[in-house]
Image (cartoon, rainbow, N blue to C red):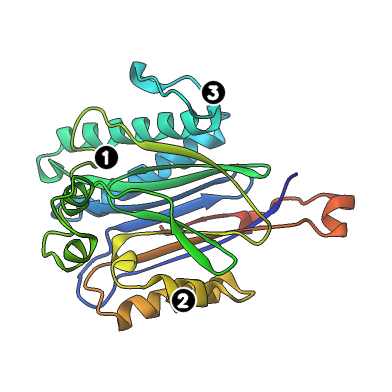
Amino acid sequence: MSFVIQAAGNTDIGLVRKNNEDNFGYDLRHGIFVVCDGMGGQQAGELASKIAVDTVLEYFRQDPSAAPVGGARFEGVSPRAVSLASAIQMANQAIHESGARDVHHAGMGSTIVAVAVEGNLFSIANVGDSRIYLIRNGDVVQLTNDHSLVMEQVRRGLMTLEEAEQSKMQNVIVRALGTDDSVEPDLADHEFNPEDILLLCSDGMSRYVKNEKMAEAVNQDSLEQACTDLIEAAKSGGSDDNITCLLVRALHPSWKDRIFGRLPSQADQKSST
């Protein structure tokens, strides 16, 4: 079964930062959705996240094969997930090389979360502490694992989740795009149910918006308004970072969709830049 996929995204500089190092983009025609959170001085983080988004979108627009980049092998996941990994490895190389060419951009990097949709199936990939949530029948489930210092300690039993949420080290990540010449994303495959919503977001949102508020915000027809409501919720919750969210909703096709098909339009592509 194939679903009609709707999407909307928004990004906000937030209440504290002087520039926005987050970027997002999506292409409904090719079923690819990306959120990145950059890091680095002198606008290098903004550049890194833009390179990541643009590279991944362009990879899928050029009929990607399942051949992994750089000789890496990914077992136990779909070719669709392997394509996500290859696109992310290409983005990592592009950021790493750009940082090596310009001393002002040295050490720049970015997190990434990405979703690739095909029919009723979707694959996810992540590097860093941006997140993907699945919202199904009012329940919110985090699909990604943060590559952060505190969450590594939680997984090793050295810290409780409650302690991690209060830690001043929450923003220290242990894996990112561009900081090394290779990177290994986490990958997984999932299946849509009707009315499922995926929320891709930077940590400027996830750290300040509780699951209950996420479910409440997306329980409306307009995904654009839901994004606005989520960003405002992050601000009200005290977010001191850039705030980005991208919502993806799977719907049963209407009788018009089934008879006439759905032709992608310019609105099916969007980027934050």
Q: Earlier in the sequence, mark 1 or mark 3?
A: 3
Disc 3 crowd rating (10 Å Cα; few below 14, some 14-19, many 20+) is: few
- Please state which amino acid type lies under the numbered disc 3: Ser
Instruction: State the residue position of label 2.
Output: 228
Percent of width and height locating residue 181: 22, 28
- Please state which amino acid type lies under the numbered disc 2: Thr
Residue found at the far right of this picture = 259
The one of 231 and 63 positioned closer to us in this rendering:
231
Q: Distance of mark 2 from mark 1, alpha carbons?
A: 28 Å
Marks 2 and 1: CB-CB under 8 Å? Answer: no
- Please state which amino acid type lies under the numbered disc 1: Leu
Q: Earlier in the sequence, mark 2 or mark 3?
A: 3
- Where disc 3 sits, the SS reads loop
Give the numbered dot on residue 177.
1
Disc 1 crowd rating (10 Å Cα; few below 14, some 14-19, many 20+) is: many
Marks 2 and 3: CB-CB under 8 Å? Answer: no
- Where disc 2 sits, the SS reads helix
Residue found at the far front of this picture = 157
Q: Distance of mark 2 from mark 3, alpha carbons?
A: 36 Å
Percent of width and height locating residue 224: 55, 72
Instruction: State the residue position of label 3.
Output: 65
